[in-house]
Amino acid sequence: MRRLVVSDKTSGSVDLAGPLSARLEYGFLVVSRAPSPAGSATPVELAVPGETDLPPWGARARTWISAEHPASLPDGIRECVVDADRVAFPLRVRRWRSGDRFRPLGMSRQKKVGDFFTDQKVSRTLRGEVPMVVDGDGSICWVVGHRIDDRVKVSARTTRFLWIEFEGE
């Protein structure tokens, strides 16, 4: 661990005894159990409308559809609202997979989720734990805790508003 900390590198890792590892990430030394492999949990289908337990994340999702335009839009951290007519049902929650892409709200082009995580300074050890809400086509609608995809954003033409709320985690 000492060599890792005093090196000129900005990132790196070393395996420790048992299931532990030490990682240098964004200037911090993180000692933890080895992270779950990305994509290791089976995707969970969301009940729309309804509530769905999400055991891999220790969370619960609640969804509903409304015809009433929200007074303000949530920030996408624990709750989001999207255009219900721009998603393909059923919705599922799964882990991030290497190569995943989405178009973060406000951007004109797609971006690899891994690059988005780097820009957002999401620790490599936590990336595999971030839930992704994907639609029936497999397209990412929401990187939970961060941002929705621009293609599903609410617009002046939206008539049905799909709310997704995460509790726990």
Image (cartoon, rainbow, N blue to C red):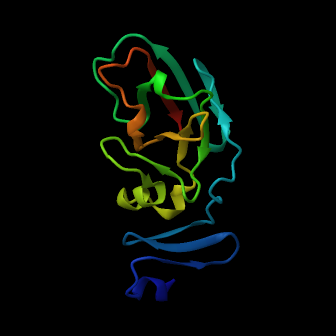
What residue do we see at 59% from left, 20% from top? 48
* Residue 11 in view of the camera: yes
Total residue callouts: 0
Q: Nearer the viewer, residue 29 or 97?
A: 97
Quadrant occupied by the C terminus: top right
Q: Is residue 88 left or right of residue 162?
A: right
The residue nearer to you, when weighing 77 against 100, is: 100
Kindly tell me whether residue 58 is visible in this rendering.
no
Image location of residue 164, percent across then percent down: 49, 27
x and y percentages locating residue 11 in the rendered image: 44, 76
**Which residue lies at the image location 40% right of the left edge and 87% below the top edge?**
6
- Residue 139: quadrant of the picture: top right
33 or 160: which is nearer to us? 160
Residue 116 in the image, given as x and y percentages of width and height: 40, 56
Residue 45 in percent (x, y) is at 66, 32
Position of residue 106 relative to residue 86, above or below, is below
Q: Residue at x 40, y 46 (%)?
A: 103
Vertical relation: 116 (above or below) 59: below
Horizontal placement of 51 versus 167: left or right? right
From what the image shows, is residue 162 above or below residue 25? above
The extreme top residue here reads: 67
Residue 21: quarter of image: bottom right
